[in-house]
Image (tube, grey):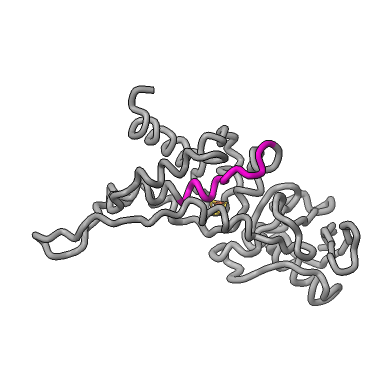
């Protein structure tokens, strides 16, 4: 079967503005969008640029906007879309384009850095002479958050970042903070919570749930942010 792809193109060296190129690809229903992009690059236009790494939903490097929704090209199949019409492939929104489908993820990683504190661990259990063992129940408190593969999709889907407050720290950084705040082995969590309250921090999140909808690891991102807000209120502002 033949499927048409409309692909965003932009080469900052020679283009003043972006355009779209159309490619017709011989494919199958169960082929991945990433496979189709590789066919375009190997058989039709070797200059089409996109990132890919593991190709199995683990590295997160092939996050793109597919038919308007941030998604991993390796996780999406042709049959997930209306393949009788064009499938539109664009770079992730919010980030600046380096070339074609490749974006500059620096703003994403800088946001993670902004919430970094010196996470101090609780002391080793002297009686048992071993590290603090964490119970399964305690691990479950933040287990979901450690599945994050840093693909950047949640930031590219967030209406606050895109339309209201570009400086907003964003869902991925808040998720990373949650991972430490709810880890029973970390003792200085107040430092982290105080950092979250700074300008463009956690209170800018208005729970649009878009991050949760697009997360390729099915992390309940908004739920973790709401849980963190509740903890900040209880621990830092008990009377409000
Ligand atoms: Fe990607 Fe989900 Fe992590 Fe956001 S929370 S960076 S969407 S894996």
Q: Dividing the image into 4 quarters, which one contains the N terminus?
A: bottom right
Q: Which residue occupies the extreme top position in the image?
A: 240
x, y percent for residue 130: 17, 64
Would you place residue 194 above or below residue 61 in this image? above
Q: Count the labels in the image.
A: 0
Q: Is residue 177 magenta?
A: no
x, y percent for residue 127: 8, 59
Would you place residue 234 above or below residue 122 in this image? above
x, y percent for residue 46: 82, 76
x, y percent for residue 113: 51, 56
Tell me which residue sits at (43%, 50%) in the image.
144
Return the residue nearer the eye: 178 or 115.
Answer: 115
Q: Dividing the image into 4 quarters, which one contains the C terminus?
A: top left
Identify the magenta region: 164-176
Q: Which quarter of the figure has residue 211?
A: top right
Residue 121 horizontal side relative to residue 176, left or right: left
Would you place residue 127 above or below residue 42 in this image? above
Q: Is residue 166 magenta?
A: yes
Tell me which residue sits at (46%, 35%) in the image.
226
Residue 35 horizontal side relative to residue 133, left or right: right
Tell me which residue sits at (57%, 57%) in the image.
110
């Amino acid at each position: 079967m033949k499927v048409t792809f409309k692909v965003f193109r932009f080469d900052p060296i020679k283009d003043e503005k972006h355009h779209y190129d159309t490619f017709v690809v011989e494919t199958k229903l169960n082929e991945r969008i990433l496979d189709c992009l590789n066919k375009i690059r190997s058989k039709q236009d070797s200059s089409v640029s996109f990132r890919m790494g593991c190709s199995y939903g683990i590295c997160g490097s092939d996050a793109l906007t597919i038919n308007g929704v941030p998604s991993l090209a390796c996780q999406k199949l042709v049959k997930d879309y209306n393949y009788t019409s064009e499938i539109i492939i664009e770079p992730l929104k919010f980030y600046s384009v380096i070339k074609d489908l490749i974006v500059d993820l620096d703003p994403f990683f800088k946001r993670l850095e902004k919430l970094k504190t010196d996470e101090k661990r609780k002391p080793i259990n002297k009686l048992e002479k071993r590290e603090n063992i964490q119970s399964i129940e305690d691990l479950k408190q933040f287990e979901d958050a450690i599945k994050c593969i840093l693909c950047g999709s949640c930031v590219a889907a967030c209406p606050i970042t895109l339309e209201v407050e570009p400086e907003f720290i964003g869902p991925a950084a808040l998720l990373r903070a949650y991972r430490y705040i709810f880890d029973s082995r970390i003792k200085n969590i107040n430092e982290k919570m105080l950092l979250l309250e700074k300008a463009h921090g956690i209170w800018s999140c208005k729970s649009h749930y878009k991050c949760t909808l697009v997360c390729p690891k099915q992390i309940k991102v908004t739920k973790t942010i709401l849980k963190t807000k509740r903890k900040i209120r209880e621990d830092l502002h008990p009377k409000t």
